[in-house]
Image (cartoon, helix red, strand yellow):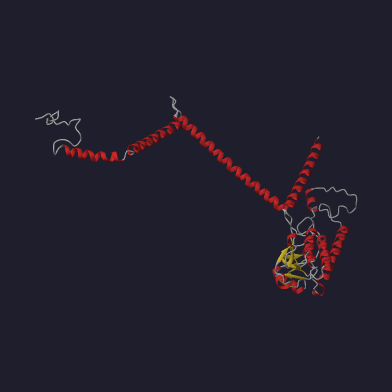
Amino acid sequence: MTEQQKPPSGESGQPDEHKPAGEGAPGEGAPQAESERLVTAPRADYPLEDELRAGDDAARREAREREVRIAGAAAGPPVGGGAGWERDLLEKVLTASLREQRAARRWRIFFRFVGLGIVALIFIALFDFKGEKAIGSGRHTAMVTLEGEIAAGTPASAESINASLQAAFADDNAAGVILKINSPGGSPVQAGIINDEIQRLRKLHPSKPFYVVVEEICASGGYYVAAAADKIYVDKASIVGSIGVLMDGFGFTGLMDKLGVERRLYTSGANKGMLDPFSPQVPKQKAFAETMLKQIHQQFIDVVKEGRGDRLKDDPELFSGLFWSGERAIELGLADGLGSADYVARDVLKAADIVDYTVKENIAERVAKRFGAAVGSAAMKTMLWSNRMQGMH
């Protein structure tokens, strides 16, 4: 046997470390080598698999270490020190700082929106054109609204209503003017001023019809104004009338006598304390007040008769201060027919488009009035407090 044909060293069956895979006795070495190739082939074909698996293992270890650190930070810093809890604490500080920055940004956005809202309100207040925007529009029906108590300093004052009526009559495109009334009355002086202005405007614009439309109520001073119209339209359930004048008050003299309260009133005229609720009623003063009321009542009656003329029915209760439904008011001649503002504009004036000329108080005026009232009240309280303190000293 030659040297190449000698069996490998280690006849005990141990494979030679230097023998290439696949060599050996037939039936023994070959199957073993084939099995090794089947096992190791996938690893050879995918060299990144081990690296990916190692990366996953490292991520899991880091997650477990972080959980341990967080648990340790909640329980307090470790006695022996360490940098892990410091890093977690830094993360918490940075997170809190980020939340504060977000909150501050949200508040800045909120205040910006508030500022824009204030600017918008100021813009609306400054550029409230009231009724002037209706001037120059096409053929239409001009309307003015009188609502609420007729008194100075209110939207239903003579100053506001007359300014609105003047603008409505002055528009050449207005086919007619409607005064929509929803008022229980008020000052006979303010109502008389409005009535006089309506008479003047009707003479100045004789070709422009003027109608009154009653909604809920048109009583007392409200009807004083309505009597100046060409025609009065009501709803069948409207309240119309109350042609009268009143003056009311209270008397506490009997109660004061029972309580032992003495009224001390000093005047420089015999009738200066007239109608004082804490003083006994004087017959002469009572008669004077009744005479004055009768005079104002007669003025009211004359205005109604002048405005309504022969349309008024001869009824003794007509000027007694009673009020009636709209349907009954038509029967008594206090109104001319049933109809709303839309009806009058569409079917009577033949101009369905309605333009409101009512002078409305804008935001700036309301704020100024309230501010002025508040300042006046504060000044009065300050003055009274000052006087009281001086009296104490």
| Residue depicted at x 58% and y 43% | 106
Q: Quadrant of the N terminus?
A: top left
Q: Which residue is at the far top?
A: 80
Horizontal side, residue 23 vs residue 215: left or right:
left
Horizontal side, residue 102 vs residue 389: left or right:
left
Q: Quadrant of residue 224?
A: bottom right
Q: Quadrant of the C terminus?
A: top right
The image shows residue 349 at horizontal and vertical percentages of 74, 71
Residue 131 appears in the figure: no
Residue 114 appears in the figure: yes
307 in relation to 368, above or below: below
170 in relation to 17, above or below: below
Q: Quadrant of residue 315?
A: bottom right
The image shows residue 375 at horizontal and vertical percentages of 76, 45
Q: In terms of depth relative to the viewer, which is nearer, 336 or 16?
A: 16
Q: In terms of depth relative to the viewer, which is nearer, 26 or 152?
A: 26
The image shows residue 80 at horizontal and vertical percentages of 43, 24
| Residue depicted at x 28% and y 41% | 42
Q: In terms of depth relative to the viewer, which is nearer, 125 or 47?
A: 47
358 in relation to 35, above or below: below
Q: Which residue is at the far right?
A: 269
Horizontal side, residue 321 vs residue 27: left or right:
right
